[in-house]
Image (spheres, grey):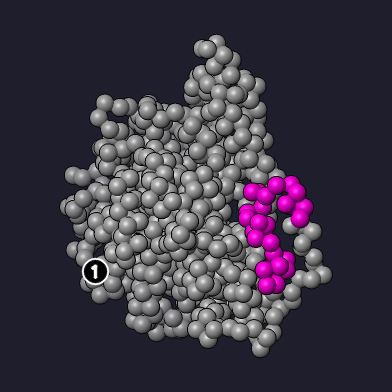
Amino acid sequence: MSAETRLLFRNIDEPGLAGIDTYRRLGGYRALERATGEIEPGDLLESLEGSGLRGRGGAGFSMGKKSSFLPRGEMEKYLCCNADESEPGTFKDRELMQKNPHQLIEGCVIAALAVGATYAFIFIRGEYWEIADLLDRAVAEAHEAGFAGSDVLGSGCRVEIVVHRGAGAYICGEETALLDSLEGKRGNPRLKPPFPAIQGLYGGPTLINNVETLANLPHIVNNGAEWFTQFGSEQSLGTKVVSVSGCVQRPGNYEIELGIPAREIVYGLAGGPPEGRRVKAWFPGGSSAPVLTEAELDLPYTFEAMAEAGSMLGSGAIIVADETVSIPELALRTARFYQHESCGKCTPCREGTNWTVKMLERVANREATPMDLEIISSVQENIIGNCLCVLGDAMAMPVGSMVAKFRSEFDELLERQAVLAA
Amino acid sequence: MSFEDGAQPEHLMRPTDELSAAQRRELIASMRPEDAEGVPELHEVDVPPELREQIEEAMARYPQLRSAAIPALWAIQRRYGWCTPDGIRQAAAVMGVTPGYLQSVASFYDLFATVPIGRHKVLVCHNISCWMNGADDLLRSFCDATGADHHDADHHGATSPDGEFFVKGFECLGACDIAPMASIDEAYYGPLSGEDALAAVEALRSGAEVLPEKALSKRQAAGGPEPEPDPRIAEVESR
């Protein structure tokens, strides 16, 4: 049997799948028919909670629980699908939207019905322009066929789907920054609480979910929450589309059952590093996740095992660095990204990312002293937990882990070493 | 900020962190809040009808019209090549907001150009996975092929001397599976070699199709052809 377990990726390369006819021929929109007919919105929510589905965007929070935080009753509520996929190493939502946009649209409408939202916004990053065009076409088809719009399949419920293109800012993947951006402002994060479930878009209760999370919903509604729980491990149910990239022979998206060993993904599916090279470090969940070492490839790929190892499953993006990659340089590349993307609203992140880059540049240029390494570590500690959002932490955690786990590589570049060598 | 008829000296239209301390002082002195423009009246501004239609259509799509700010800026950039002060003023008049408001939004986002840039946009990803697969060389190849300044391209983006190309080292574009890659006029291509960069630039110059065999839209799933479905999935599918 293949190491892949294709559920969301089922028939992914079927010609015409991006069109509504092929999607329906393969069983599409049956779940929505069920959700508007035989199932009550309350039962729909219960079923989402019962499935144990955890968010696929990065935080891994229970999707059903998040939905249940929204107040009941008549009011303007909103659904936002986070398709701002900008976490370095992550490209799963891109392929899910490009090849099977209707699966996402069906998931959006189901989620909107479950929480009583009248608008579903798909916030897609501006760089994905060609994919946003595809989505636009699919949304028009869904409206035309009555799967979305003022009266979804005659149920009397209104769900308008709007594809909203961003304009290039990693921070807009942060849920409150996404809301500000969608309201037509600069994408700065908001102070929480209030959480978006209570006061989100335009001040109304708002549910925000990642593309992959929502793409799971048609399958859960079709087959039942209990069916879903047979996939994955106890705390990590379901399948996961994993984006593997970096030093591997077959980079790409692979859909796996959560719980298989990471080694099977990196070596079995992606082919491992080029012949004759070994894995030195790997990010298990995008560049914001602390790096793990070669030995940790034997861990099961689950939310809980990655957390226990001091990292996180995050967005499910595995970036592999082999022994030809310099870790101090990798740390610098990583930090530069967050320096560039910091919105500047709060000080620890704005200054912390900036100074970390400066110090890592000193290391790379062999100008650093041992004290610089201590300062790098202490700056990371002072960022974590002290910012409005987690962008600062997202730099501090991986950079801190690289200094801690590969200290000798940094030491080799210190000024004193350079002088001694000369 | 006042932008009347080129009142803004061109050397101050660079990103602020590229300005010297003296230039920054000059820029600040040129900003006179008392001169800031209010909401322009629609009858005072000459708005092309198609642009007005695009912006009004965007305003109608959202429960609140300010959500149309980013779609409006996209419409301006599409029409004029960058977010020109005149274009921003036109959108502001249609939306009923101040030009300063739209300017502040435009300056936040990487994809909006608040200074003139080259016609064809080449964004070369230089984030981790692309870097490990040779992104630095690829950026250099695009600079060599277009004549854009490499240092500027790697920082804020650079326009080629003939004004045809804008080349920029960009953060993760979400296509690490085709590393090293580039977004060329909003379509993704990869994995790219130095020769591919040259060929792409030539194709853009001559109007030919850009690297058809390297287009992301043609890429199949990495796991290959459809495997036999998992029995747990096959069983429910057959119901």
| Along the viewing direction, whichever of B168 and A410 lies nearer the viewer | B168
Dot 1: element: loop
| Along the viewing direction, whichever of B41 and A422 lies nearer the viewer | A422
| Along the viewing direction, whichever of B197 and B133 lies nearer the viewer | B197
x, y (%) of residue A288?
51, 42
Horizontal side, residue A66 vs residue A225: left or right? right
Q: Residue at x 49, y 32 (%)?
A: A329
Q: Residue at x 69, y 80 (%)?
A: B40
Q: Verify whether residue B208 appears in magenta.
A: no
Q: Residue at x 49, y 48 (%)?
A: B149
| Along the viewing direction, whichever of B108 and A295 lies nearer the viewer | B108
Horizontal side, residue B77 vs residue A213: left or right? right
Tell me where residue B42 sits by quadrant. bottom right
Q: Verify whether residue B16 appears in magenta.
A: yes
Give the class, few, some or many, for how many residues have Cα within 10 Å of label 1's Cα (few <14, many ≥20).
few
Q: How many marks?
A: 1
x, y (%) of residue B133?
36, 39
Question: Which residue is labeled 1 in the image?
Answer: A16
Q: Which residues are magenta?
A: B1-26
Q: Against A165, is A6 above or below?
A: above
Tell me where residue A188 sits by quadrant. bottom right
Horizontal side, residue B168 vs residue A265: left or right? right
- Residue that protrudes farthest toward the right in the picture: B34
